[in-house]
Amino acid sequence: MSNPLMGMLGGNAPAQNSMAQMIGMLKNAGNSAAMLQNMAQSNPDIKKAMDMCRGKNPQQVFMEQCQAQGINPQQIIGNLK
């Protein structure tokens, strides 16, 4: 299964900014679970990412996908700060 978030995780700065904005919105949302469900209904890539994480630790899924794609996860985490 291809990772729908890899475009956001690569070296593409605008996509990383988009990811950082989404994380900020989730942190500020009163009900982040409901917000994610709404986003998944309107964005198929978010739905795919949520499906990938279903029943799994999202951090572990992220690390596995980075490793599979040859991407340094710490670089991405640093870019989101």
Image (tube, rainbow, N blue to C red):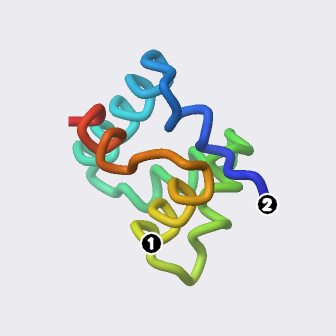
Q: Is residue 47 left or right of residue 58?
A: right
Pinpoint residue 42: horizontal percent, then vertical percent: 68, 40
Tell me residue 50's x, y (percent).
60, 61
Tag 1: Cα neighbours inside 10 Å, few (<14), some, or many (≥20)? few
Residue under the point 68% across and 40% down: 43
Question: Where is mark 2, residue-wise?
Answer: 1
The residue located at (50%, 37%) in the rendering is 9
- Residue annotated with mark 1: 60
The type of residue carrying mark 1 is Gln
Q: Residues within 10 Å of mark 2 (few under 14, many from 20)?
A: few
Residue 66 in percent (x, y) is at 51, 54
- Image x and y of residue 44, in percent: 74, 44
Quarter of the image where the N terminus is located: bottom right
Tell me which numbered mark, 2 or 1, is placed earlier along the sequence: 2
40 and 1: which is toward the camera = 1
51 on left or right of 71: right
Q: Residue at x 24, y 38 (%)?
A: 78
Callout 2: helix, strand or loop?
loop
Q: Is residue 68 above or below residue 76?
A: below
Q: Is residue 20 left or right of residue 57?
A: left
Disc number for residue 41: none
Name the amino acid type tagged 2. Answer: Met
Q: Is 74 on the left-hand or right-hand side of 51?
A: left
| Quadrant of the rendering where the C terminus is positioned | top left
